[in-house]
Image (cartoon, rainbow, N blue to C red):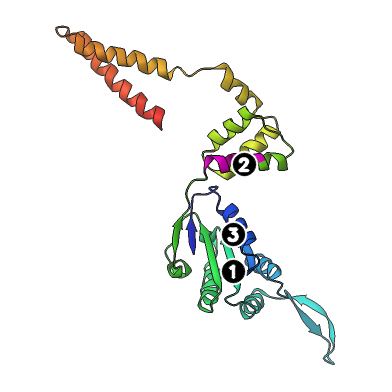
């Protein structure tokens, strides 16, 4: 399955929850690729309890120790120990290297269950073989508040109602941004912003009301070209500000 959503929209959270829910059914590995191919393979192998080392021998054929497997050996070892009872969750799958994606194709062909979490669909190799395409919706507000509260507790903070509402609103359904805002609050960099939100009131409603009044005058000033011109300009400004306030 391919799950798509913008960065920070909760794909990793979804992957972790699915792993927890399906732990009794599948052998599960969650991995991401940050440029180190071997590190990604080792992470997958360790989560699936697959060896990552191979024995070393002396000239008499006796085992003298162990040495790390190469990337090619890790690919083969993981593939030989995976089947339809294995679930591999690939986070930020669009970043995975071509060699890893081709390897995933082989796993998919042998029945391994794959979940690709991506910000976009590259529409090539393994992405073309995924049977279901799911667009992840924005995290609901109540769930977002719960996640923010959990993150705040993790960082040693207790948010009041105002702070929780402010972070939820400013995060816009993006869990990564929410974590950043909580961290900034913990560091004391957001305190002034929270204070200022109570000290200042937006003048946009008053400005829109004034422009609306001028636009009404345009229609009342039947014989005055100047007032009709001013009213027409005010009407245009009113519509522009109205659209910007909705953005």
Find residue 153 and report its horizontal and vertical position in percent: 71, 40
Q: CA distance from mark 1 to mark 3?
A: 10 Å
The local secondary structure at tag 3 comes to helix
Q: Which residue is mark 2?
A: 146
Q: Earlier in the sequence, mark 3 or mark 2?
A: 3
Instruction: Locate residue 160: give its quadrant.
Output: top right
Q: Is residue 71 above or below residue 116?
A: below
Find residue 140 and report its horizontal and vertical position in percent: 52, 43
Q: Which residue is mark 3?
A: 18
Instruction: Locate residue 217: give its quadrant.
Output: top left
Task: Name the residue located 68 percent from the left edge and 65 percent from the top edge.
Answer: 43
The magenta span reads 140-149
Side of 207 relative to 224 (left or right): right
Count of numbered badges drawn on the protein? 3
- Mark seen at residue 87: 1
Task: Name the residue located 82 percent from the left edge and 91 percent from the top edge.
Answer: 61
């Amino acid at each position: 399955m391919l799950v798509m959503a913008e960065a920070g929209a909760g794909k990793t959270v979804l992957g972790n929850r699915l792993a927890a829910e399906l732990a009794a059914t599948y052998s599960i590995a969650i991995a991401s690729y940050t440029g180190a191919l071997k590190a990604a393979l080792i992470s997958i192998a360790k989560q699936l309890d697959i060896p990552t080392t191979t024995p070393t021998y002396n000239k008499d054929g006796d085992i003298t120790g162990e040495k790390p497997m190469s990337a090619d050996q890790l690919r083969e070892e993981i593939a030989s120990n995976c089947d339809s009872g294995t679930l591999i969750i690939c986070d930020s799958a669009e970043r995975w290297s071509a060699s890893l994606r081709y390897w995933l194709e082989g796993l998919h062909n042998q029945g391994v269950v794959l979940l690709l979490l991506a910000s976009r669909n590259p529409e090539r190799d393994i992405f073309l073989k995924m049977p279901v395409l799911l667009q992840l919706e924005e995290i609901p507000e109540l769930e977002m508040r719960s996640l923010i509260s959990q993150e705040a507790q993790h960082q040693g903070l207790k948010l009041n109602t105002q702070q929780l509402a402010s972070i939820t609103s400013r995060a816009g359904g993006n869990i990564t941004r929410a974590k950043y805002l909580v961290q900034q609050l913990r560091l004391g960099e957001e305190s002034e912003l929270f204070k200022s939100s109570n000290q200042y009131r937006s003048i946009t409603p008053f400005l829109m009301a004034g422009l609306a009044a001028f636009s009404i005058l345009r229609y009342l000033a039947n014989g005055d070209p100047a007032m009709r011109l001013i009213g027409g300009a005010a009407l245009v400004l009113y519509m522009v500000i109205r659209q910007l306030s909705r953005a």
